[in-house]
Amino acid sequence: MTDHVTPPSLEQLEERLKNIDTLDHDALEVESIAILGRKSGALTAALRSIPTLPVDERRSFGAAVNALKARFEEAFEARRSALEGDAGRSGLSGDLSMPARHTWMGAVHPVNQVVHAILGIFRDLGFSVATGPEVEDEWYNFLSLNFPPDHPAMDMHDTMYLAGPSADPQNRLLLRTHTSPVQIRVMQGGPPPYRVVIPGVVYRRDPFDASHAPAFNQIEGLAVDEGIGFVDLKATLTHFAHSFFGSAADVRFRPSFFPFTEPSAEMDIRCQLCAGTGCAACKGTGWMEILGCGMVHPRVLENAGVDSERYTGWAFGMGPARMCLALYGVPDIRMLYEGDVRLLSQFAGAPE
Ligand code: DAH
């Protein structure tokens, strides 16, 4: 039994073929069944009508219907994928002409970039890296380093103590005020020679102003061996300054005082901002103070259990944040610690 459906004329079908491109998703499926449906689709009806045609028309009519069927199938497919593509694109990102959003990349903080650069220079000279605790006792932080017991730096008002007064300096805990106590810990850890650099955070009762912060980074250095003299200190630190600031950098050593070194010195670099003519950053002197240094005091060696008759050494301490200010010409140390991405992002691509 065959359903009796009057087949549309081939001209009508051609018309409907042209309209497929305008159909939406639902109308497309309805039309697809109306044309290709195996039971009552228009093309099926046309094929079924062949036996009713005069014999000499059947072959060409059949061929025309089959050709039309292929074109319909192609047109439905094309329209389907066009609709899917539109839906996929608009579903994902809306306005396709909008510029892509910038991705945020984390970066090493400029002060840490400077720390890494400094450690790298000393690593190339054969120094290894050591670290120590940020909570120290009064013996490590002051007394072992030859601070006299009545030194004002030990005053409760000058240093951040963690516990109340105690008769025993090893019970008086404090936030370390410098990385120098790690010198003692390194020397206690095994026999000389030592060549170490010691990065770390230190704490002081300082105001947060253009050149001070209550918590800041330091890098300590220590070299102890037989026959080490002041010339080794000068040569090594001059080499360091040239590696860090460039070979044209000018340095000078000035006499200074630290309880744990004798003699002691301060190393300055010719001001990187004004080239020595005098500006606000160098307070008109033309020089910037970079680090403190000196020959390790024999009493410090003895306090750490090192034979000061046999061994000598030199040490230094510097602030990487100040080095960062000097290197990049940042006028205020607070700018480095505020976390303002407008400043920090400028260092995102700086070499390590
Ligand atoms: N500890 C000193 C400070 O914080 C810096 C310093 C100076 C360290 C001279 C040293 C040194 O090792 O020899 O101000």
Image (spheres, rainbow, N blue to C red):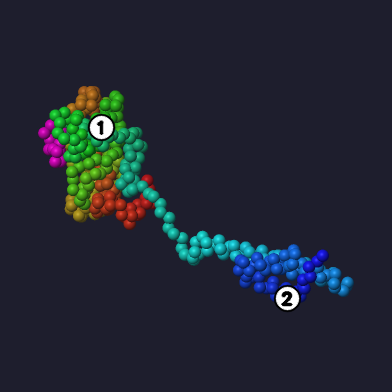
- In magenta segment, residue 134: no
- For numbered disc 1, what is the local secondary structure? helix
Q: Earlier in the sequence, mark 1 or mark 2?
A: 2
Residue 217 image offset from top left, x and y in percent: 27, 42
User: Would you call the spot at circle 2 few (<14 residues within 10 Å), some (14-19), or many (20 or more)?
Assistant: few
Residue at horizontal 17%, vertical 39%? Answer: 159
Residue lying at the far right of the rendered structure = 55
Which residue position holds label 2?
12
Give the distance between the C-alpha atoms of the residues marked 1 and 2, in whole angstroms.
97 Å
- In magenta segment, residue 145: yes
Q: Where 171 sits versus 99, above or below? A: above
Q: Nearer the viewer, residue 110 or 40?
A: 40
Residue at horizontal 19%, vertical 29%? Answer: 170
The answer to whether any part of residue 247 appears in the image is no
Q: Report the span colored magenta.
A: 144-158
Q: Amino acid at mark 2?
A: Gln
The N terminus appears in which quarter of the rendering? Answer: bottom right
**Label 1, ligand 1: CB separation under 8 Å:** yes
Q: Where 308 sits versus 275, above or below? A: above
Q: Nearer the viewer, residue 317 or 93?
A: 93
Which residue position holds label 1?
183
Residue 340 image offset from top left, x and y in percent: 31, 54
**Horizontal arrangement in the rendering, residue 226 relative to residue 94 (left or right):** left
Q: Amino acid at mark 1?
A: Gln
Residue lying at the far front of the rendered structure = 1
